Image (cartoon, grey):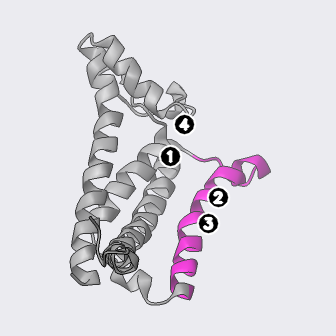
Amino acid sequence: MDLRSHAGLARAIAAGAWSVVCGLILAAPILASRGWHAASAACYLFFSPVCHQAPERSFAILGYSLAVCHRCSGIYFGFFLGSLIDLRWIHKSPRARRCWTLAAILPLVIDVLAPYSGIWTNTYLSRFATGFVFGILISSLLVRGLAEFLDEVPQYWLAIGDSHPKGGLS
């Protein structure tokens, strides 16, 4: 397999993983609205180490907040969408990847810090949008990294097999 076929596998793995995460985000309020409070609480608990989950800063469906805030919703749904689309132009060089990483982070940082200076008041839309852009761009980099990892794994195992006393793995 070459990197191109690994890119498809990496994209499928990432899209599958992020779809589960996004499903859990949406499942929390749906389960709560159906009276499945223990299952709902488990979803909220899963995300609690990475998100403040403040209800006033979270989208709500069916009368319950999503399992994460506006910004985290944007990031996770951006990760999912970014894993589905091919942004190959981001990966032209290591320098280009660094620049795109900065381009993904900068609007998010400005949206977080600008309200403290009084020059900007962020809204649910700015929090979601900056998280979404960040998620899409970073997801593309994560998919590329996973594809490169998958490209190296067979060579690693072949190298171990060559160094095994019997000439292969048993």
Q: Residue 109: which disc?
A: 2
Answer above or below: position of 63 versus 138. above
Disc 3 is placed on an element classified as helix
Q: Tell me whether the residue at label 4 lies in contact with that at label 3, contact meaning CB atoms closer than 8 angstroms.
A: no
Answer above or below: position of 18 versus 8. above
Taking the spot 48% from the left edge, 45% from the top edge, the residue there is: 72
Q: How far apart are the alpha carbons under marks 4 and 1?
A: 9 Å
Q: Residue 24: which disc?
A: none
Question: Which residue position is annotated with label 3?
Answer: 106
Between residue 132 and residue 170, name the one nearer to us.
Answer: 170
Between residue 56 and residue 139, name the one nearer to us.
Answer: 139
In this rendering, the label closer to the viewer, 4 or 3 = 4
Where is residue 128? Give x, y as percent: 46, 49
Looking at the rendered structure, the kind of residue marked 3 is Leu
Magenta span includes 167: no
Where is residue 42? Give x, y as percent: 39, 22
40 displayed left or right of 134 = left
Question: Which residue position is annotated with label 4?
Answer: 51
In this rendering, the label closer to the viewer, 4 or 1 = 4
Q: Tell me whether the residue at label 3 lies in contact with that at label 2, contact meaning CB atoms closer than 8 angstroms.
A: yes
10 Å neighbourhood of mark 1: few (<14), some, or many (≥20)?
many
Residue range (magenta): 95-122
Residue 31, picture quadrant: top left
Q: How far apart are the alpha carbons under marks 3 and 2?
A: 5 Å
Q: Residue 71: which disc?
A: 1
Disc 4 is placed on an element classified as loop
